[in-house]
Image (cartoon, grey):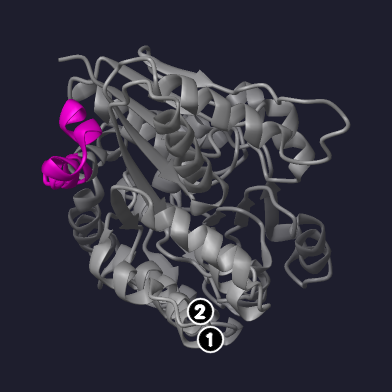
């Protein structure tokens, strides 16, 4: 039977682990026999206008043959001050939901993607046309801190109810970590306490954990013989640099990393490579320039997908000292797992949000906001001999392979297949 997977997400070129997750799930779906796989995202010009950190367009790897990326055009003109792009996305979903092809639709991020999917399905069903759709909504980090929690904290009852209701309208509800689920349920409980609603109990019962899908095999198959050549183009050597590779935002703790690196006694001739883009870039450049190790801090803002894996594989330590902020709390830590898969240097990180679920006991954990602890961790990690480093790398990789994209997709599809089909004819036509 023909079956389609539609993923609604902020896709490439956005620098975000869940952008990569969408690609991974799409490609895994092809391997699992889906006859059609589509990613619905936003026009490039709109992404550029938002201020989101973006990869260089010429360094984004092409999607695998069989994955169709759609970027629906906005609907309306200047008289519609906002919502034009959302109207285009929602309208395209309505068309897909009513064309007769059995569809599993996965929304990554509750706002606006899960909201758009719930609205589109309501419209599709109201047309009277036959629909064959199962909807899956996955709550991620920015949903928790930037949307749900903020709506509750700022007293925006209607906005919180809108997001939570749209989430519950989906057939399968997922969260990217136990931490994510706990925060959503806690935020919903605050809404319930103030307004007499019943969101928390429903979410506690229905939300399942689905860790982000990672292309494990691409790291296991990495041609490490090419790594010295790739690094040499940047003036780097294998095992001779400390790496940070992620978005440049205040929540990532890069300022603490720069201070900790400056205080470390084990890396006097080993550069600190800070790879990424983001809203905190200018401030971090200024901090590094004023540091006593300014000449050893290297910023890279043009790293492509292919180069990223080699940078991770060749580092002597990977440091992501993430910390909770009002805008964002790390709800998993995809980049941490990717470094563990690469076989690169040991991970140094914090126990913030869902990071512990990502790294298990395979990382050196430091307190948040503690450059001295980062310095001590660097001293310890950089002093390891080759056999110790190999042992740690093997343990880390063995832990990280559980997040393989095929296994994650299979888990989602098992939940789809377990739905109570007698309650909805449209579900029977899909499953």
Badge 2: residue crowd in 10 Å (few <14, some 14–19, many ≥20): many
Marks 1 & 2, CB-CB < 8 Å contact: yes
For the point 65% across and 25% down, the residue is 57
Q: Secondary structure at mark 1?
A: helix
Magenta segment: does it hold 161?
no
User: What numbered label is drawn on residue 42?
Assistant: none
Query: Depth check: 294 or 154 in front?
Result: 154
For the point 32% across and 35% down, the residue is 25
In the rendering, at what x and y percent does residue 83 appear?
A: 71, 39
Magenta segment: does it hold 420?
yes
User: Is 90 located above or below residue 203 in the figure?
Assistant: above
Residue on which the image places disc 1: 194
| Residue 296: quarter of image | bottom right
Q: CA distance from mark 1 to mark 2?
A: 5 Å
Look at the magenta stretch and give its main secondary structure: helix
Residue extending farthest right: 78
| Residue 148: quarter of image | bottom right
In the rendering, at what x and y percent does residue 239 appear?
A: 44, 52
Report the span colored magenta. Answer: 410-431
Left or right of 379 in this view: 172:
left
Please count the marks in the image: 2
Q: Quadrant of the N terminus?
A: top left
User: What numbered label is drawn on residue 191?
Assistant: 2
User: Is 364 located above or below residue 74 in the figure?
Assistant: below
Query: Depth check: 353 or 191 in front?
Result: 191
Q: Quadrant of the C terminus?
A: top left
For the point 75% across and 28% down, the residue is 45
């Amino acid at each position: 039977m023909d079956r389609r997977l539609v993923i609604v997400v902020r896709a490439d070129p956005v620098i975000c682990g869940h952008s990569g997750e969408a690609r991974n799930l799409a490609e895994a779906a092809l391997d699992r026999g889906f006859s059609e796989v589509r990613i619905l995202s936003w026009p490039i010009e709109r992404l550029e206008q938002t201020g989101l950190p973006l990869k260089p367009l010429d360094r984004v790897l092409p999607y695998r043959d069989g994955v169709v990326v759609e970027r629906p055009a906005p609907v309306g003109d200047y008289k519609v001050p906002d919502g034009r792009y959302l109207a285009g996305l929602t309208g395209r979903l309505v068309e897909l939901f009513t064309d007769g092809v059995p569809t599993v639709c996965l929304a990554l991020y509750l706002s606006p993607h899960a909201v758009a999917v719930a609205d589109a399905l309501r419209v599709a069903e109201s047309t009277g046309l036959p629909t064959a759709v199962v909807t899956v909504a996955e709550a991620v980090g920015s949903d928790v801190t930037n949307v749900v929690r903020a709506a509750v904290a700022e007293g925006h009852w209607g906005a919180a109810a809108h997001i939570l209701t749209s989430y519950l309208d989906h057939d399968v509800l997922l969260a990217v970590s136990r931490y994510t689920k706990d925060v959503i349920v806690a935020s919903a409980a605050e809404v319930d306490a103030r307004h007499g609603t019943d969101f928390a109990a429903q979410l506690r019962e229905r939300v399942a954990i689905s860790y982000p899908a990672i292309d494990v095999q691409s790291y296991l198959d990495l041609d490490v013989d090419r790594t010295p050549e790739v690094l040499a183009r940047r003036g780097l050597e294998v095992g001779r640099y400390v790496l940070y590779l992620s978005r440049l935002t205040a929540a990532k703790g890069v300022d603490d990393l720069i201070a900790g690196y400056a205080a470390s006694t084990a890396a006097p001739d080993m550069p600190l490579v800070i790879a990424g883009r983001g809203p905190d870039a200018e401030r971090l450049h200024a901090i590094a320039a004023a540091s006593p190790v300014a000449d050893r801090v290297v910023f890279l803002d043009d790293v492509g997908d292919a180069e990223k894996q080699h940078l991770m594989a060749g580092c002597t330590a990977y440091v992501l000292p993430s910390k909770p902020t009002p805008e964002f709390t790390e709800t998993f830590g995809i980049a941490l797992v990717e470094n563990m898969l690469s076989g690169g240097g040991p991970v140094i990180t914090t126990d913030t949000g869902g990071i512990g679920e990502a790294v298990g006991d395979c990382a050196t954990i430091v307190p948040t906001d503690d450059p001295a602890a980062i310095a001590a961790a660097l001293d310890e990690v950089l002093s390891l001999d080759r056999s110790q480093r190999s042992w740690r790398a093997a343990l880390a990789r063995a832990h990280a392979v559980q997040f393989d994209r095929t296994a994650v997709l299979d888990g989602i599809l098992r939940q789809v297949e377990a739905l109570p089909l007698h309650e909805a004819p449209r579900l029977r036509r899909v499953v």
